[in-house]
DNA sequence: GTCTATATGCGGATAGAC
DNA sequence: GTCTATCCGCATATAGAC
């Protein structure tokens, strides 16, 4: 077995994902990914033109997994309950897979050029809010909710809440937003 | 003038701040900072034990400047107006000095060991909310607001809002939170 | 107190053999 | 399609001369 390893793009992506979640985005290197596959770094260039391309694939994967997870955890037919489920699931994903979550969210997406996976996530949020407010394209509500959820994930992850308990703040904010969407301005 | 440059810790910190804001945190290096001062990198070690110490000083500076700026822009005596001013000023700081803002916010603060500067910022938020809800230590409200503000800053900076206009979402979320704080749960 | 020189390590990427 | 060998650049940090 001199060199019959036979890679695939999907295999490399899987290894990259594992490396990301285990060692953090700061330590994500082509050398490390290759090593974890029992292969040398230059081989990767036959499947991805450069590191940036591999990173783009990782971001798409993150979007897809976040969306799938969140959708699976949002099953209730009551709009308010479903909304709370969605919010809770989103935060839980950020907590359980912080490296993937923050890597996915912390990269510039040039203008409106959102990826398919990113769009699907956005649409999931819009649908949940649409059931709540009656407006199927209530972007301002979606922006507000997304900002709250993401901001909470960041501050929670960075340990800034201390012992004061982030949970009360999460529910307080969530209920306030819910109430704000019930009454139209 | 072979080597009579006479540095000071404050001078180095100022140069580091300039470098951070001009080149981004990814490119913040001791070599670069030293070069901008007409000095060689090893000289810095006489004023800061290592790079991490210099970064801690930068974070404290970021907290202080964010707090000063926000406080200066919050002058109204009416609690609701003052709250809107605070929120708007916070976001404006993040927009005008994104590198400093995100560098300050994106570093782990171990547990409750918050810096003095960070505490003062937190207290500013608590005071504004206290005037609003009557509870001088309403941490859950502060957590909710901070999460919303920071999340909005992140998503705004990453260009994820596209043309749909983030402004409406910002005001929508802000008013919802305000309404939620008016009515106690 | 600043310098030169250097140790040591990381990373992306390419050329060319097999 | 994978390899070896290498180029090139970046960085933090230290030792010791001046």
Image (cartoon, coloured by chain):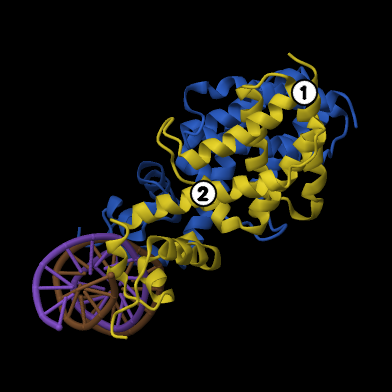
Chain colours: A yellow, B blue, C purple, D brown
Asked if badge 2 and badge 1 are on a common chain, one would say yes
Q: Residue at x 68, y 38 (%)?
A: B146
- In this picture, residue A89 sits left or right of residue A12: right
Q: Residue at x 72, y 18 (%)?
A: B81
Element on which disc 2 rests? helix
Q: Is residue B122 above or below residue C1?
A: above
Which residue appears farthest toward the right when viewing the image?
B185
Element on which disc 1 rests? helix
Instruction: Report the quarter where the N terminus of chain A lies.
Output: bottom left
In front of the other: A31 or D13: A31
Per the model, the C-alpha gap separating discs 2 and 1 is: 29 Å
Q: Position of residue A177 (x, y in %)?
A: 76, 29
Instruction: Report the quarter where the C terminus of chain A lies.
Output: top right
Q: Is residue A123 visible?
A: yes
In the drawing, what numbered circle is on residue B178?
A: none
Q: Is residue A161 above or below residue B155?
A: below
Instruction: Specify which label sits upstream in the sequence, 2 or 1.
Output: 2
Q: Residue at x 70, y 42 (%)?
A: B122
Q: Quadrant of residue A129?
A: top right
Q: Quadrant of residue A179?
A: top right
**Circle 1 residue:** A180
Q: Position of residue B41 (x, y in %)?
A: 32, 63
* Chain letter of the residue carrying label 2: A
Q: Is residue B126 visible?
A: no
- In this picture, residue A89 sits left or right of residue B150: right
Q: Residue at x 76, y 42 (%)?
A: A75
Q: Position of residue B12 (x, y in %)?
A: 40, 53
**Circle 2 residue:** A104
Bin the neighbour count of mark 1 within 10 Å (Cα to Cα): few under 14, some 14-19, many 20 and up. Answer: many
In front of the other: B30 or A111: A111
């Amino acid at each position: 077995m001199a060199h019959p390893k036979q890679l695939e793009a999907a295999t490399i992506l899987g290894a990259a994902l594992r490396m990301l979640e285990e060692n953090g985005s700061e330590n994500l290197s082509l050398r490390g990914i290759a090593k974890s596959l029992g292969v040398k770094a230059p081989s990767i260039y036959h499947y991805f033109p450069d590191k940036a391309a591999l990173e783009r694939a990782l971001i798409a994967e993150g979007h897809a997994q976040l969306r799938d997870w969140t959708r699976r955890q949002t099953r209730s037919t009551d709009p308010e309950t479903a909304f709370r489920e969605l919010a809770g699931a989103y935060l839980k994903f950020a907590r359980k897979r912080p490296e993937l979550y923050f890597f996915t969210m912390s990269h510039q997406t040039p203008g409106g050029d959102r990826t398919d996976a990113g769009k699907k996530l956005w649409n999931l949020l819009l649908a949940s809010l649409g059931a709540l407010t009656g407006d199927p394209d209530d972007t301002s509500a979606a922006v507000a909710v997304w900002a709250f959820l993401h901001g909470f994930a960041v501050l929670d992850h960075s340990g800034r809440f201390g012992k004061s308990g982030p949970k009360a703040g999460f529910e307080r904010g969530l209920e306030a937003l819910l109430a704000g969407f019930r009454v139209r301005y």
